[in-house]
Image (cartoon, rainbow, N blue to C red):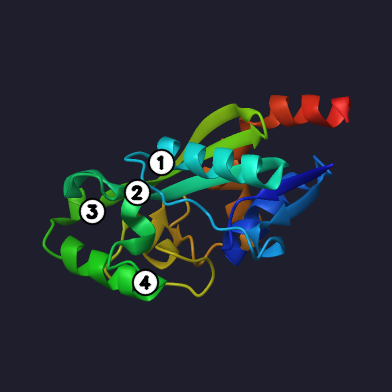
Amino acid sequence: MEIVIASKNLHKIREIRSILKPQYPFDYLSLLDFPDYIPPEETGSTFEENAFIKATHAASALKRWVIADDSGLVVPALKDAPGVKSARYAGEKATDKENREKLIKTLDGLEESKRIGYYACAIALASPEGVQKQVMGYCEGSLLLTPRGSQGFGYDPIFLKYDYNKTFAEIDEETKNKISHRRKALDKLAPTLESLLVSN
């Protein structure tokens, strides 16, 4: 059975695939396999709404089961920014580096005790008939003004994971995949994926 990961982000596709494949051996595709498919605009005001939009649109258009995620970094002291605009915080076509640099400049005006945040990940699992399961996962940490590490993506080089004293860009991929917000959300899909595996 095929499940489409509704993303063109290679980092995200790889992470979801590596977390799920060992336990749920479906054939995982991504939007890179469907170059003619045009994803919908992410018009939601929450991660959950955007995951729902992406999952239902792709599942209906591609006539397949779809896993869609919407995730980002939330900083309570900045009124929950970057939030749902994490990928375009510095502009619609902003790079990861540009987004990080804008956030660092904004954080620089905060006292250290307020430079805390969390990654949030909403995941929706949809069939062509609609969403079958929706879940959330979180991962807390503090934020640095100087990037560290060369792994990961997005805000990982400035996200210092609690209890590890390492940024997500310094933690190896295997460890990150055990503790990330995306992992915590995907774990909550387990019963639904299990039943899907049995029925197929």
Which of the 4 quarters of the picture holds residue 35?
A: bottom right
Asked whether the beta carbons under mark 2 and mark 3 sit within 8 Å of each other, the answer is: no
**For marks 1 and 3 on the same chain, the one whose residue lies earlier in the sequence:** 1
Above or below residue 48? Residue 97 is below
Question: Dot 2: few (<14), some (14–19), or many (≥20) neighbours within 10 Å?
Answer: many
Question: Dot 1: few (<14), some (14–19), or many (≥20) neighbours within 10 Å?
Answer: many
Gap in angstroms between the C-alphas marked 4 and 3: 26 Å
**For marks 2 and 4 on the same chain, the one whose residue lies earlier in the sequence:** 2
Residue denoted by label 2 = 84
**For marks 4 and 3 on the same chain, the one whose residue lies earlier in the sequence:** 4
| Element carrying mark 1 | helix
Asked whether the beta carbons under mark 2 and mark 1 sit within 8 Å of each other, the answer is: yes
Which of the 4 quarters of the picture holds residue 194?
A: top right
Question: Dot 4: few (<14), some (14–19), or many (≥20) neighbours within 10 Å?
Answer: few
Percent x, y for residue 9? 56, 63
Residue denoted by label 3 = 115
Label 2 sits on what residue type? Val
Q: Residue 4 or 11: which is nearer the viewer?
A: 4
Percent x, y for residue 133? 60, 27
Label 1 sits on what residue type? Phe
Residue denoted by label 4 = 93
Label 3 sits on what residue type? Arg
Gap in angstroms between the C-alphas marked 2 and 3: 19 Å
- From the image, state whether disc 1 or disc 4 is nearer to you: 4
Q: Residue 186 or 123: which is nearer the viewer?
A: 123
**For marks 2 and 1 on the same chain, the one whose residue lies earlier in the sequence:** 1
Q: Is residue 162 visible?
A: no
Q: Please give the name of the residue rendered at 29% of the width and 62% of the height, measured from the top-left corner.
A: 89
Residue denoted by label 1 = 47
**For marks 2 and 3 on the same chain, the one whose residue lies earlier in the sequence:** 2
Percent x, y for residue 27? 82, 49
